[in-house]
Image (cartoon, coloured by chain):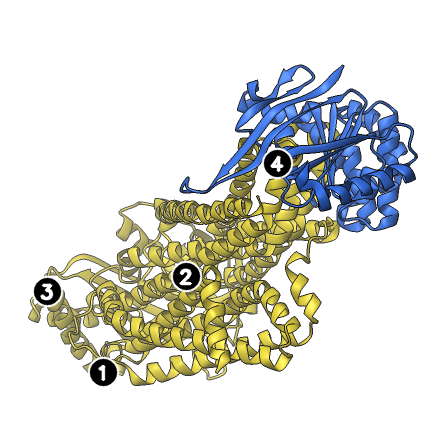
Chain colours: A yellow, B blue
Amino acid sequence: MIYPKLAFDGIRKNKRLYLPYILTCVGMVTMTYIIDYLHYSKTVSEMKDGSIIGEILYLGNLVIAFFSCIFLFYTNSFIIKRRKKEFGLYNILGMGKHNLAMIILWETAIVAAISIIAGLAFGILLSKFAELVLLNIIDFGINRQYDISVPAVIDVTLIFLGIFALLLINSIRQIRFSTAINLLKSESLGEKPPKANWFLGIAGIALLGVAYYLAVTITNPLAAITTFFFAVLMVIAGTYLVMISGSVMFCRLLQKFKGYYYRPNHFVSVSSMAFRMKRNGAGLASICILATMVLVMISSTSSLYFGEEEALMIRYPREINAEIQMDGIENLSEEKIAMTKKVIDEAAEKSGVQISNEISYTAAQVTGILNDGVVETDVTSYVMPDLAEIEKGLYVFYFVPLEEYNRIYGTRDTLESGEAMVYCYRGELGLDEISFNNGNTFKIVKNLDAFYLDGDATMMMFPSIVLVVDDLEEALGGLLSLADFNGDRMVTTQWVYNFDTGLDPDGQVAATANIWEALKELDKTEYGIYSRSLSGREDSRREFMELYGGLFFLGIMLSIVFLFAAVLIIYYKQISEGYEDCGRFGIMKKVGMTDRDIRKSINSQLLTVFFLPLVFAALHLFFAFPIVKKLLMLFNLNNISETNFFAIVCIACFAVFAVLYTLVYKVTSASYYRIVSGRKEDAR
Amino acid sequence: MSILEVNGIRKVYSSRLGGNKVEALKNVSFSVEKGEFVAIMGESGSGKTTLLNILAALDKPTGGSVVLDGLNLSKIKDSSLAQFRRDNLGFVFQEFNLLDTFTIEDNIYLPLVLSGKPYREMEERLRPIAAKLGIPGLLKQYPYEVSGGQKQRAAVARAMITYPKLILADEPTGALDSKASDELLRLFSEVNMLGQTVLMVTHSVKAASVAGRVMFIKDGEVFHQIYRGDDTNQEFYQRISDTLTAIATGGDEK
């Protein structure tokens, strides 16, 4: 049995290469198991909204499995490249391709066995801890039972056996199609001088520019979803192009300025930089993308998590919120409303509620597409609008009587017929006049800074416009007679009644239930009610916590995986450069550079190359900021823009990341210098 | 007037623990006159490379002194050694030692750039040298794109461009085929005719036969030396080869 021995020797002798690789495999297996474990976990499925978390975790699982596959391919190709020389030697010594394949098979099997077994062991050890973290994040009771999830073990084993099988096929394919001499020389290949590809370099810069422009100019949060997707793709492509071609192009450009280039401190740096970038462009771009992903993910999910309370407040402005749709404008009368109010108030009182901070107003609501100041209300598909329509300008219009507005805000504004005061939620209007097809035209006399919207409006995907008008019925006019396919009225009329209770959370939940019981019993015809809804803030807190906490947890887990990957790419970059640089080191010394000069020059190059991704990541984050903020608005984090909460989170995340990154740099550059100086002694 | 004086240098390498001592050079003394072309011959392990490293100020002797143009190398501070090498010495190596990150032209400029010479001056210096070495057409190419002989000519250009007092060549023909070797040796003797002092370490009789004087090193000492006198290359080749045979067979009797 010579193959296992050769395979073991191969791994042991190249431990500088294999150790980080195996560690990564173990890490990936561990992460996949933990997330899969939580996905199957009873504790999670027992949660009130366990399905939300379950979905999120399942999604995360897919992402990690897919990413593991790509990333392990990347690191494995690196190892194969360096091992080819050894295989070439075996080949010359008389081993056929078949024998080499056997060695590779054994090596892969050993690595796979170690990774899966150790990964599962760590996963099982850490899964409970991860569960505790998750439960803590979403503020759920603690489960003290310790268990191993068999389906998760099976899933993970199958996933990674699959990945390793693919890696094996790829390695064998590479050996198969090269000759012994190619294998021996493979390490010194790829030393051709980098040519600046102007087209690709400029294309990369252009792509980044367009993506940045899109991100900055976006105004509609909904359009932000699709734009964000395209911008991300463009930024990824742009980053790769700029790092690979753009940087070489830049060095070549510098070389054209003879007065600059032929100076002692520029000469060596500029020309070696071109080589360094050519070798590392893809790796650096990957680091940059990973860094950006980590930063965006962590800053947005943590914003969501820490802004959860605020979002809850916006969605549920008061502790108990009732919204009653009256059956037509004729039922939106003081009399009918007073009847319903009495029922609610009585039920509330019985539950010990002391009504305070009461908000009560009537409004009419209609949906339409706004285009050039004209609203087309005959939209039959507004129930399930598609994105294209929303981007065309789909809005929800609320008509609120002036009288009610003045009462809520304690103002004494006056309006003529045909005039309106306007508040636009999630968007900007900038119009002087707004007119409704089949309805009336309003002159906008005042833009309002705020209006107390009920929670439903904040849940809508599309923006809302509030028009405060003198008289509701007159203002709606012809709109009142519009009907949709089913013959239902297009204008809905509602009464909003929200108040605080002065009760503790449990009391609030009980009160909400009691009031709902009373409300449910009401006779629709007698009370003129079309539909009714009631929501309690405390009832929904759980759901919010789970959704936002689940996202935050997944953000942390994915960030750990991506960081892992970034660190490993950095490590391999340093090592491969170390091997390639030590020859150059010697020559420069002989030609008349001092040790210190060389170190200084190389150090500055390493630093530049190293911090380039960080700088780009910061730039990406900076430009992603406005668009991510818009996306967060869809999660009710709109006040964030005013408090700069998100900006602070972003900066904090970046600072932590930069510190980590520098730490990794210190550690990996130490191994770089070890290689460079080690080889120098051998050569002597 | 001698440009290089080597007085009784010794070099002892000790193993890391200080136990085993190896004496690479015992007692080497010789001098090189200005405009001379000297070849140093010896077998592997005779101390040739150690000697060259000491002459190049890449290594320090355990004892004795090296004086280049009146300047004692051991008196130069470590910090200015690199500059001293750049300004006074030119190097030609067996493996060319061109940096693959530079074009041929930039490789040749390297020592001048390091000394902070302006671009215009570098260009003026390069033109005649490139013409003499027959490489004007290769200047914009990269080392990997040209042949071994062309690389070595570029390396010679790099050695000459600083107008060094002494060119040190370490097995310059070692990695070349016979045609490229002949070409390079012809270049060396032409350069020497123009007054350039050259010191070459080699174990190729062919290479040594173009020199004006050949020193033989054995076991860390200058064992013997012969002058060309009026010999043709052919005749000198014969004498060198005879001497080598004599040293190899009866050398121990001395």
Closer to the camera in the image, A417 or A498: A498
| Marks 1, 4: nearer the viewer | 4
Q: Dot 3: what SS?
A: loop
Q: Quadrant of the C terminus of chain A?
A: top right
Instruction: Classify mark 2: residues with Cα within 10 Å, few (<14), some (14-19) or many (20+).
Output: many
Q: Quadrant of residue B40?
A: top right
Of A198 and A104, the residue lying toward us: A104
For the residues marked 3 and 1, what is the alpha-carbon distance in whole angstroms?
A: 24 Å
In which quadrant of the rendered view does residue A538 lie?
A: bottom left
Residue drawn at (47%, 78%), measured in percent from left and top? A4
Quick check: B114 above or below A190? above
Question: Which of the two discs, 3 and 1, sits closer to the camera?
Answer: 3
Instruction: Say if A378 sits above or below A475 in the image.
Output: below
Disc 1/disc 2 C-alpha distance (Å): 36 Å
User: What amino acid type is highlighted by mark number 4?
Assistant: Gly
Dot 2: what SS?
A: loop
* Residue denoted by label 2: A634
Quick one: label 1, few (<14), some, or many (20+) residues within 10 Å?
A: few
| Distance of label 3 from label 2 (alpha carbons) | 32 Å
Q: Is residue A58 left or right of residue B246?
A: left
Tell me the distance, in whole angstroms, between the alpha carbons under discs 1 and 4.
117 Å
Residue B220, label in figure: 4
Residue B98 shows in the view: no
- Please name the residue shown 66% across and 64% down the image: A184
Chain of the residue where label 3 is placed in the rendered structure: A
Query: Which badge, 3 or 2, comes first in the chain's sequence?
Result: 3
* Image spot of residue B81 (x, y percent): 59, 25
Residue that badge 3 annotates: A353
- Whether A10 is drawn above or below A453: the answer is below
Q: Position of residue B44 (x, y in %)?
A: 66, 46
Q: Are marks 3 and 4 in contact (CB under 8 Å)?
A: no
Marks 3 and 1 on same chain: yes
